[in-house]
């Protein structure tokens, strides 16, 4: 199945577990795991934080669009998408044309706990991190809800989350038309 499998795009807010779930499933399904942030960093030769600082957020969003449009294989991949990737107009439609989208979800309290002390996310480098997170979460909630099936990642063992994502992926991949 691996090389020809329909791509799976994991979307959702920062700290919902996209990379952890994606890595686990990629191993199980013998698919290739890609993290959009990491792929962009490798291609640009600098960290996401540096891209934001030197080139600005709009440039980073352009790089995300380019990565989804033509920067990765059309089949056989599980892609953990950066939290804001699906937000700009047209990105959801682009993702839909490329594969199955599953949105990982967690309540804001869990997101706050998971991201409060991280240092690699430029959007959170502000004096009042909690307010920033709550604002972004509120701004994006509707967009995430429209992306596709939502899987809750809060207070559940990782193997159960992965099994849930796998069930949804199999059902939706069977009906996917490229
Ligand atoms: C962002 C989320 C990050 C990264 C960048 C911007 C966002 O990815 O792409 O810092 O806008 O939500 P993660 O969701 O993997 O943290």
Image (cartoon, rainbow, N blue to C red):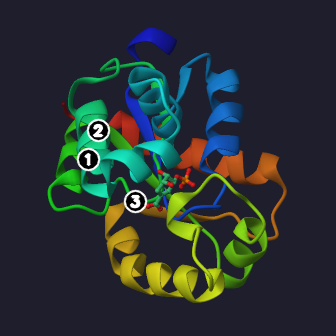
Q: Report the residue at 55% width, 19% height from top.
A: 31
Of tags 3 and 1, the one toward the viewer is 1
Q: Residues within 10 Å of mark 3 (few under 14, many from 20)?
A: some
- Which residue lies under the disc numbered 1? 59
Task: Tell me if the residue at label 3 has its CB under 8 Å from ligand 1.
Answer: yes
- Which residue lies under the disc numbered 2? 63
Q: Position of residue 16 (x, y in %)?
A: 63, 61
Q: Residues within 10 Å of mark 2 (few under 14, many from 20)?
A: many
* Alpha carbon separation for disc pair 3 and 2: 12 Å
Q: Position of residue 81 (x, y in %)?
A: 46, 45
Of tags 3 and 2, the one toward the viewer is 2
Residues marked 3 and 1 touching at CB (< 8 Å): no
Q: How many marks?
A: 3
Q: Report the residue at 53% width, 32% height from top.
A: 38
Q: Is residue 63 left or right of residue 48?
A: left
Q: Nearer the viewer, residue 147 or 178?
A: 147
Residues marked 3 and 2 touching at CB (< 8 Å): no
């Amino acid at each position: 199945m691996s090389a020809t499998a329909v791509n799976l795009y994991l979307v959702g807010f920062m700290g919902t577990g996209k990379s952890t779930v994606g890595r686990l499933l990629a191993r199980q399904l013998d698919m290739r795991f890609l993290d959009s942030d990491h792929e962009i960093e490798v291609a640009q030769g600098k960290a996401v934080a540096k891209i934001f600082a030197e080139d600005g957020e709009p440039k980073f969003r352009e790089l995300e669009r380019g990565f989804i449009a033509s920067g990765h294989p059309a089949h056989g991949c599980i892609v953990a998408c950066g939290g804001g990737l699906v937000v700009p107009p047209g990105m959801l439609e682009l993702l839909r044309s490329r594969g199955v989208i599953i949105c990982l979800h967690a309540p804001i309290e869990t997101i706050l706990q998971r991201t409060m002390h991280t240092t690699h996310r430029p959007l959170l480098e502000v004096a009042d991190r909690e307010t920033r997170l709550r604002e972004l979460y509120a701004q994006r909630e509707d967009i995430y809800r429209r992306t596709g099936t939502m899987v809750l990642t809060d207070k559940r063992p990782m193997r159960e989350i992965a099994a849930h994502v796998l069930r949804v992926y199999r059902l939706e991949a069977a009906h996917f038309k490229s």
